[in-house]
Image (cartoon, rainbow, N blue to C red):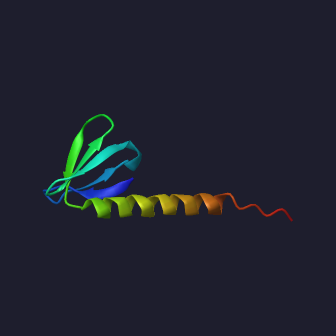
Amino acid sequence: MIVLTKRNHEKFLVNHLQIEHIECIPESKITMMNHDFYLVRETTDEIIDKIAKYNAKVMDIQREISVVDNR
């Protein structure tokens, strides 16, 4: 889940796996797979960066969990 900001400055969480596409109009329009959409203050580059950071964090946690000591 990533934190985004609505036009009224309200913060909310989005499941990035449910994003269908992002349009770059004066603000960013995120369309979800169920065809709901959100207008957010973040740029498309910022959204992509948040998704990449979240995925990297999840992969790092998975790597830490899967380390096994075979002594």
Report the front residue among 70 and 22. 22
- What residue do we see at 37% from left, 47% from top? 15
In which quadrant of the rendered view does residue 36 lie? top left
Q: Position of residue 62 (x, y in %)?
A: 60, 57
Quick one: which residue is furthest to the front in this view?
Answer: 24
Q: Position of residue 29 (x, y in %)?
A: 21, 49
7 lies left or right of 34: left
11 lies left or right of 58: left
- What residue do we see at 37% from left, 64% from top? 49
Q: Position of residue 22 (x, y in %)?
A: 28, 49
Compared to residue 34, the image places residue 12 above or below, namely below
31 lies left or right of 57: left
- What residue do we see at 16% from left, 57% from top? 27
Quick one: which residue is furthest to the right in this view?
Answer: 71
Image quarter in which the C terminus is found: bottom right
Compared to residue 62, the image places residue 18 above or below, namely above
